[in-house]
Image: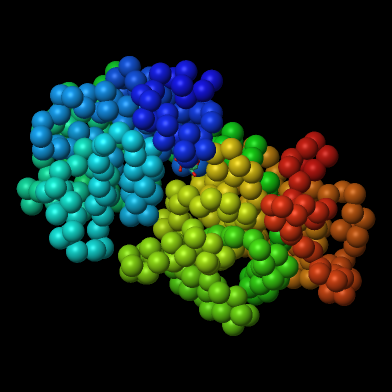
Amino acid sequence: MTFKELGLAEPILKALEAEGYTHPTPIQEQSIPILLQGKDLLGVAQTGTGKTAAFGIPILHQLYEGISLRQTKRKVKALIVTPTRELAIQISESLTAYGKYTGLRNTVIFGGVKQGKQVNALRGGVDILVATPGRLLDLMNQGFISFRDLEHVVLDEADQMLDMGFIHDIKKIIAKLPPKRQSLFFSATMPKDIVELSRKMLGDFERVTIKPEQATAEKVEQGVYFVSKANKPKLLIHLIKENPENTLIVFSRTKHGANKIVKKLDQAGIRSAAIHGNKSQAARQKALSAFKDGNLKVLVATDIAARGIDVEDLSLVVNYDLPNVSETYVHRIGRTGRANASGTALSFCDKDERPYLRDIEKLIKQSVPRMPEHQFVDEDTPKDTGSQPSQPQRKQGNSRNKNRNRNRPGGNNFRGKNNRNSSRPKKRTDSNRSE
Ligand code: AMP
């Protein structure tokens, strides 16, 4: 299947070609025909699957086809609501790229900055509005936005909106939209509240499901290190220094933890930056831009700040802390291996986090391959570390292993995308599946 076969308008095909998109991803292949028929859609999928283009392209196509009907002043005809500022900016950038030959205009509004520039952009007239819920409701209440001409609405990352406490804002926003519209609802997971919300928002809809296991386990190579809490910084520094060419995101469960990691890396002469909710929007954007441009190799992030962030050629995701909510693991490792690329995710697991690892393995229905032993082992590393029975030294006592590994040049090294070696985590096979 090609984009041309989907019957898209010429200017959109031209833009997709310029982006280097040759074939639609599964979610695009399934969603675009449904949306081009004007139907509502429930998409159970996470970012990284090509979701933005799956909803963005049909909206651009439909607006472009109706362009001759447009009055002189542009009116908001499509609204996309997404939980974080970073995601909103990213969606807006994608729409600009996909729609660059259509003459359609989009703008993005989000909180944490003064509203003046955003209000001016709205006054100038836009076809598509991308927004975070709080600022959107605020500007709606101030009378800066009219949805009288709205034809399409997308609710993106609905489950994260729920987690972030936006559900009431969302309900208020939906209540103010014209009832005759095309509605799209995307969520990575479908807890009860989200099912209810989707029922309220969608009319007669079709459902497309892209399973997280499909999106991650098949493309992302995974590995776990058993390491004590105290040794986590050393292991991280070791991995970065071994492979300085890697671009990596380090996930921390807490904002304070993220700051501490940056400090430790700094002391080791490694430049990094943290993004989390306590950082100003300007600081977050600066760090993210430097990271995307390749000027910053290491980004330390909390889950909320990093969800959905799209960075090309991200070689590695490090779970410095294992998340206590298993779905978060899937979101995190989905930062790498996006669209058709492959990637690697390495997790640090201390003894308190082992129950989290078990939950994750249950969710993804596979065991995360154990990395070979290294000099920073957890004192309580279980004897059965799972996946590499071919290594007899694993069966011996930890202290002996520790000493031997300390003397091993390079210890355990991970080489990143372009530099495969034997210590790279293996994809699951029956022989490396843990008991
Ligand atoms: P998303 O899930 O929308 O955040 O997309 C994840 C990444 O996949 C982004 O870098 C997109 O530019 C890229 N992408 C989306 N669709 C395609 C496609 N059909 N071919 C190649 N890359 C794509």
Q: Quadrant of residue 79?
A: top left
Q: Position of residue 137 (x, y in %)?
A: 17, 48
Residue 415 in view in this figure: yes
243 sits to left or right of 396: left
Residue 55 or residue 329, whichever sits in front: 55
147 sits to left or right of 54: left
Coloration mode = rainbow
The image shows residue 158, relative to residue 5, as above or below, that is: below
Q: Residue furthest left?
A: 143
Q: Position of residue 420 (x, y in %)?
A: 77, 52
Q: Residue furthest right?
A: 392
Q: Position of residue 377 (x, y in %)?
A: 75, 67
- Counting labels gives 0
Residue 84 or residue 10, whichever sits in front: 10
**Quarter of the figure that contains the N terminus:** top right
**Quarter of the figure that contains the C terminus:** top right
72 sits to left or right of 405: left
Residue lying at 54% horizontally and 62% vertically, measured from the top left: 294
320 sits to left or right of 87: right
Residue lying at 26% horizontally and 43% vertically, measured from the top left: 106
Residue lying at 20% horizontally and 33% vertically, measured from the top left: 77
Q: Position of residue 404 (x, y in %)?
A: 89, 71
Residue 167 in view in this figure: no
Residue lying at 69% horizontally and 52% vertically, measured from the top left: 417
